């Protein structure tokens, strides 16, 4: 029996599935180890939940449920139909013994275990000039001596959870064979051997950038076409919309993030005055022979431009499942497996 890891102190914070999904919300039928987009609100923009909140992982609290049904039999049978032949078969199951690394390393991803206590002029807690004898001014600034729960507004942090129904991974092996004596000193063995591993542990990154279901990829292609049309017409390296009969198309998503204007304003070329339409940060990913829509999207929703998108009416999870955790949202669960099948023929003499 392998009992789940538990906390021996009160130093860690804890995330829940609701924390991981944030504003996207987590449906009750979502299987975290085998997520289906329709069952887990993946790549489906729209507010159904609340911003993430971290609670304290208390001493003695388990990270996931106990997996009780780990029966591991080893069975074998051999039958000798005559003095020169033997038929044999076997089956065995064994469970993996995992180390502590998945628990100790991954649990550190949640906020609260460490606190940054820097002094700098930029942070406003260090003024110059100063002398080295001013020890009180060179020490760490005031900071909370213990974590304060619940923790919120950790937009640059990660969230990490274990699947509450995490299973212990195991492997099955089986074989069936036939042995035949060929004279007094020769033996022929024919065997079939099979094996499989099931429920191997894996980490899933749920905050993958969405560029398809939200329509962004289609707009990215239009932006590429706009750039080429503007270059050919001598309007410069810009992907802005110049109006009908110019070979360019409206870009409502980019306009929302650049200027905070709704989709209804995308057909007016006078609204495309933002210098971002000619910025190299967005022009470079539009390269015709080396396009990078993920880089374009990542640049689009960072740098405070998500506030513009909110004013334009786009949902906060337009690109990310949990935009309040831009460091990442991870689930440690049961994932991949493997199979192996093969015959074996051996001649002993």
Image (cartoon, helix red, strand yellow):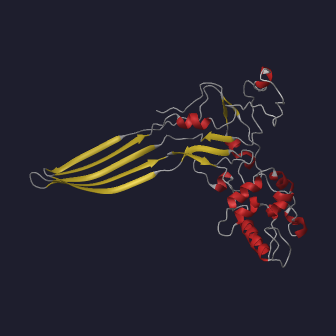
Q: Where in the figure is residue 307, as x and y percent of width and height?
A: 83, 51
Q: Is residue 211 left or right of residue 241?
A: left
Viewer-nearest residue: 186 or 280: 280
Residue at (72% x, 28% y) in the render: 147
Residue 271: x percent and y percent?
A: 89, 65
Instruction: Tell which of 137 and 277 is nearer to you.
Output: 137
Q: Position of residue 342 (x, y in %)?
A: 33, 57
Give the farthest residue toward the bottom: 245
Could you tell me if residue 45 is visible in this image? no
What is the quadrant of residue 315 in the picture?
bottom right
Q: Does residue 244 appear left or right of residue 211 in this picture?
A: right
Furthest toward the right, the residue is: 270
User: How many labels, in total?
Assistant: 0
Q: From the top left corner, tell me how far across and down residue 179 is, in percent.
A: 20, 52
Q: Residue at image x 34%, y 49%? A: 174
Specify whether residue 160 is in view: yes
148 w.r.t. 209: above or below: above
Indicate left or right for 286 with 233 as reference: left
Residue pictured at 78% horizontal, 20% vertical = 133
């Amino acid at each position: 029996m392998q009992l789940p890891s538990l906390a021996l102190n009160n130093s860690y914070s804890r995330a829940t599935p609701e924390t991981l999904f944030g504003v996207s919300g987590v449906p009750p039928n979502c299987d975290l180890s085998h997520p289906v987009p329709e069952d887990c609100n993946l790549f489906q923009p729209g507010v159904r939940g609340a911003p993430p909140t971290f609670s304290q992982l208390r001493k003695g609290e388990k990270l996931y449920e106990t997996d009780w049904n780990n029966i591991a039999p080893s069975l074998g049978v051999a039958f000798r139909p005559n003095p020169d032949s033997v038929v044999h078969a076997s089956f065995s199951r064994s469970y993996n013994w995992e180390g502590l690394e998945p628990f100790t390393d991954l649990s550190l991803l949640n906020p609260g275990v460490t606190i940054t206590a820097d002094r700098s002029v930029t942070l406003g807690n260090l003024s110059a000039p100063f002398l080295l004898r001013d020890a009180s001014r060179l020490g760490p600034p005031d900071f909370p001596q213990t974590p304060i729960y619940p923790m919120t507004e950790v937009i640059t942090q990660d969230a990490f959870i274990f699947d509450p129904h995490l299973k212990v991974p195991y492997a099955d092996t089986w074989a069936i064979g036939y042995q035949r004596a060929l004279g007094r000193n020769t033996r022929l063995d024919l065997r079939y051997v099979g094996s499989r591993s099931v429920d191997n542990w894996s980490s899933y990154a749920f905050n993958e950038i969405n560029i398809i279901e939200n329509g962004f990829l289609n707009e990215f292609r239009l932006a590429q076409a706009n750039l080429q049309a503007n270059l050919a017409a001598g309007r410069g390296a810009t992907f802005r919309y110049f109006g009908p009969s110019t070979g360019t198309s409206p870009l409502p998503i980019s306009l929302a993030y650049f200027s905070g204007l709704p989709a209804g304003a995308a057909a007016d070329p006078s609204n495309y005055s933002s210098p971002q339409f000619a910025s190299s940060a967005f022009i470079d990913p539009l390269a015709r022979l080396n396009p990078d829509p993920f880089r374009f999207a990542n640049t689009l929703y960072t740098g405070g431009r998500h506030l513009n998108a909110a004013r334009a009416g786009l949902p906060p999870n337009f690109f990310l499942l949990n935009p309040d955790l831009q460091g990442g949202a991870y689930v440690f669960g049961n994932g991949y497996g493997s199979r192996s099948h093969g015959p074996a023929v051996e001649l002993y003499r």
